[in-house]
Image: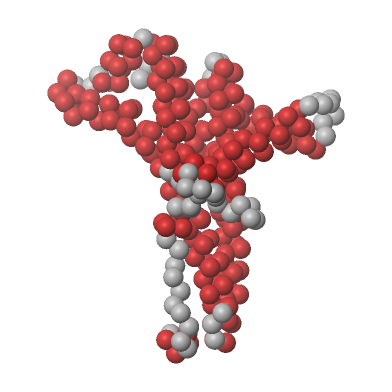
Amino acid sequence: MSLLLSGEEGFTPPSTADFNLPPVFGDNPYTTKPIFLVFLSVIVVSTFFIAASRKALVMPTKLQFAGESIYAFVRNDLARDVIGHEFMRFVPYLFTLFTFILTNNIFGIVPLLQFPTMSRVSFPYVLAIFTFVIFHYVAIKHKGILPYLKEIMFMPGVPKPVYILLTPIELATYFVVRPLTLSLRLFANMFAGHLLLLVFILGGDHLLKGVIGLKLVSPFAFAFGIGLTFFEFMVQCLQAYIFTLLTALYIAGALADEH
């Protein structure tokens, strides 16, 4: 390999440092690219659905059809089918959650933007906290705080000695594990996917600058990177769906009369 490189500098692979972007201007940590992408996503989502619903027709336009299809998917498949008859009051949150996550995920493969906002773990943490607060609030309002805590800590039909082990596990599951796994699953997938794209695209660019033997290999790196981009798009959509689906499942569990 050293002969092939023929004195060229070695390839420095991307790392976690590539996700710590400097401020766009000044030294303010709140002017970084991910922050601006979050604001951009709000503008994009709002503009799209306002435009899609502004002049609703019986025979919908393509834009109206697209907007209604996304809304119907969240309303029917993620809210009604999972939560049940009380689903309508949770549709606004689930719809906002799905479209917000999806847009920020897709930013990772949009030219010039090319950064998935959810690869910064603070954003999934905040979304998980919202979900955490909502499903606990719903459960407490529906069942009462003491019955709800009793349901969590003392699962019916379990021998009393088992509670010594089961109760701490259930408390940790409801108050620690659920929000952590919800946020870390989204973060890890967006982080890993973007890192892989960086490896193949930057690696292909580096090979292209090498000697003839490496130049011949570079198209394969670029081709793999392009193929991985389409795969990453599927993962981005899937992760938005999974996060919203789990949120709906948690809310459904909070509304259930039995554990």
Q: In this image, 211 relative to 29: left or right?
A: right
Residue shown at 37%/37% (left/top)? 180
Residue shown at 42%/17% (left/top)? 137
Q: Residue 73: percent from the left, percent from the top? A: 64, 32
Decide if residue 238 is in sight here: no
Decide if residue 66 is in sight here: yes
Q: Which colouring convention does the figure follow?
A: secondary structure
Q: Vertical placement of 86 versus 205: above or below?
A: above
Q: Report the residue that reaches farthest toward the left.
A: 161
Residue shown at 55%/72% (left/top)? 204
Q: Residue 79: percent from the left, percent from the top? A: 56, 25
Residue shown at 41%/27% (left/top)? 132
The C terminus - image quarter:
top left
Dividing the picture into quadrants, the one containing residue 169 is top left
State the count of labels: 0
Q: Report the residue that reaches farthest toward the front.
A: 26
The N terminus - image quarter:
bottom left
Q: Vertical placement of 103 versus 166: above or below?
A: below
